[in-house]
Image (cartoon, coloured by chain):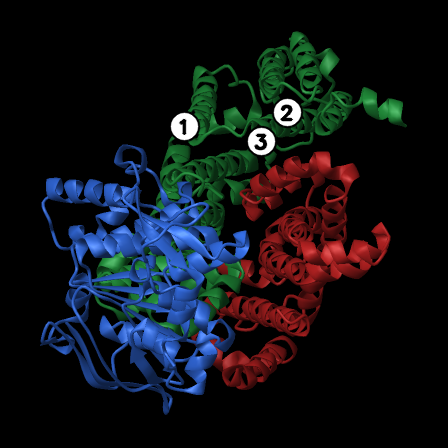
Amino acid sequence: MTGWARAGAGLSAPGVLFALLGCGALLVPFMTLAANRIVAGEGVMVWSLDGRAGALAVIAGLALGLPLRPAWLRLIGAMLGLAGLLWLLVQGAPGLLDGAGEYARVSPAAGFWCLLVVLMLLMADALAQMSPGAAMRGVLLLAVGGALALILGSGALSDLSVMQEHAARRDAFMREAVRHLGLAFGSLAAAALIGFPLGVLCHRRPELRGTVLPVLSFLQTIPSLAMFGLMIPLLGWVGDAVPGAQAIGIAGIGFAPAFLALVLYSLLPVVGNTVAGLAATPPAALEAARGMGMTAGQRLIRVELPLGLPVILTGLRIVLVQNIGLAVIAGLIGGGGFGTFVFQGLNQTATDLILLGALPTVALALSAAIAMDILVDLTRRTPRDSR
Amino acid sequence: MSVGRVLRPALIALLLALVLRPGWFEPVFAPLAPEGGPVIYERASLLSLSLSHLGLVAAASLVATIVAVGLAIFVTRPAGAAFRPLSRTIANIGQTFPPVAVLALAVPALGFGAGPTLVALFLYGLLPIFENALTGLSTLPPAVTEAARGIGLSRWQRLLRVELPLALPVTLTGIRLSVVIALGTATIGSTVAARTLGEVIIAGLLTNNTAYVLQGGLIVGLFAVLIYDGMVQIEQRLARRMGA
Amino acid sequence: MIEIDSITKVYNGEKAVDSVSMTAETGTITVIVGTSGSGKTTLLRMINRLEEPSSGEVRINGDSTADVKPHILRRRIGYAIQGHGLFPHHTVARNIAAVPELLDWPKDKIRERVDELLDLFSMEPDQFRGRYPAELSGGQAQRVGVARALASRPDLLLMDEPFGALDPIIRTRAQEDLRRIQRRLGSTIMLVTHDMEEAIRLGDRVAVMDAGRLVQHASPAEIIANPATEFVADMVGNVERPLRLLSLIPLSEIVEDGAAEGEALPADASLRDALSACLWTGREAVPVVQDGSAVGCATLAAIRARAEAHR
């Protein structure tokens, strides 16, 4: 037992887990080849693909993840493994399509997705070990995003089914992407404009806080589909009843109900975190501020707001991530966004169309979360205060 | 408090009526239905849809609770300590995944029906419970854990008699968050052919029948709000008992 | 001059402060001492109108505090509190500059004043200007808190348990610093504490509060020698009264010609110090020095005579 423990002392336990899972995933079909975009395909193992060097890179990457230190070596291992995965896709897809028929499609299969998850976790684990500063994380985020854009833009992956779905609706994809961002960021902005003053007001008036916060958390509880659905008759009625409302786009279907539903969902995090952030000022500092003759406004601007900013921004982070996800549901009520592809895909049982909607949403939510975390860290300016 | 005492039974009564006697509401919803179209959803009994919906949520949440609390116990023991930073990272990253996307991504892997919905509900439900249970177990008052060691409780006894009961309120909050998310995600599950109340809303959206949309939306919304409220009550009672 | 004129504060029908009147002369320290709930903090907070009096008024140099807006009034009155209340997101320099900034002083004048105050509190400006409160020790943070309260040269400095959060050794030093700086600047200070020792050490005048009422307002020596009520006597601590009294009298008052053996004490040391030195080293007298040269000795007999003088 002790000997075993000593031998394992230099190894990272998660690293061992990743290596085991990764090796297991290599034994599962890596890609599928299907006769067309609807039917289920046939699995293809890693060793029957072109570009087998990629598999070696994956194994090497997982091996580099094994030792506990240095963390940067584990990070390099994760990157090497991811590069290997990519190489397998790029090299493997054309080989499979060769002679498989005009409508044939190749897609990544379970093996690929499992390895992707495992290697991403290895990367996250190594990064958590290194705990890089805000600037470093920003550079990493930009680098990964840039590399992804470069690869997708280069056409190296154009043989994959999901990319063919994209190619078939290039314009629609751009349109829905813009629509999705508009929904997510627009509702964030609207919620901030309404929620922030409301939060300040609640901070000042405890009795108001006692009414507003329960109502907002009640709103937050309503399931998204029901909320979106309930907006339809409501806005439909407004559109009919208020002259000129339809001219500015208020109607029971489309962008307006989706937007309003997202704003309603966003109010609780914005108001709640504004209240919590403003309340986080040490009581002694607040007492001193009052005692030295600051007006209520000066206390807010000079003391409470700067000290509460990290918490307030955390509220905006929650809202942004949440709304990027919820905006998918807008696709069901004609509100547009990536959800359009998801639900079209579900209707047509076209897996790759689902992916075309779901993957960008996940990537968007993830990068928004990382970017907002960096921002929150930057606002914790004072040293030794970065809890 | 007094508002709750009046409102709560009223909402429960409204919910029961909507589910058990939908016919009563025909005059209310009629103006919203398309002309000549059906007003009350009759393709399936609302009661069976409700039960199926709640069943899915209950099953997924139960399993998620067991697994999540088990994992939280594991990573707070010496043997699992190596996995603690990683588990935190996963919980953090995992919660940025949109529930709808998780559901949609489960379809390619598992096909249509209740299966992917259950898996998506389970996977997504794990995270808030795990995160809260971990917080609860790792922020115990040191004086209490010291005292538990001091009076000679074994590791198991400490876990069962001291640590888990103390972590319970925070864990319950996680379970509540998880259940509320699951109720919402299950609604969307009807787009992947799971039998849930979302079916009513979706049917309304597809046939432009606002009456259906409102009917389904009201029932799901009431369920969510009442379940949320009930769990808050339990948490408060527990917190009061523990003198918090 | 600060005049408090039959000021009363009523909370929910109960009088937290009950018709208190007193006057503090310019350039003196008045210490308000009492147990918790005695109304001492409420009394202090009514002076800069953090609490509005229910009746009565406060006049600073003849002007009623009710005639100006509260925040304008407070900018003229320094305020230092327990646990310092420094702004954690501002540097030491910005913390000290808070009130001058509110008063729109020119930038270079503010900078000059900050350095002047840091010097005054024996903190090297170059070293401390840019630090954040989290990077200061408890004693340093407390000094910055007092420096901040003094920054705009206020008419009056209010201090609410300013040394409450400090450990005993640092507290004694902080009290000495305050006394020294007050003498040098000639500030008028009103300080609240629950610690009679601190009140006797710092106060030119001590005001004892009990259950909202001012029960005695007198010099420290008077308070010790003739406590007005049982409560004041308890606060002073009957057993230690002679020692407290002796600690107020400098050796210079009883020094007599003659020589004595052993280690000398400075002329501004207290009779209590001399008594302690005599008992500890078994001497009948200690030599006294002033500015490095011997000026005589202090005898046990003379100390005893002073301790009995009040009878």
Q: Any mark on residue A212, and which? A: none
Dot 3: chain letter: A
Same subunit under labels 1 and 3? yes
N-term mark: 1 or 3? 3
- SS at mark 2 in the image: helix
Relative depth, front residue between B28 and C273 = C273
Q: Is residue B96 above or below residue A279?
A: above
- SS at mark 3 in the image: helix
Residue C149 occupies quadrant: bottom left
**In the figure, what tint was chain C given?**
blue
**In the figure, what tint was chain B given?**
red
Q: Any mark on residue A119, and which? A: 2
Question: Total number of numbered labels?
Answer: 3
Label 1 packing within 10 angstroms: few (<14), some (14-19), many (20+): few
- In space, the residues marked 1 and 2 are separated at their CA atoms by 23 Å
**In the figure, what tint was chain A given?**
green
Q: Is residue A215 visible?
A: no
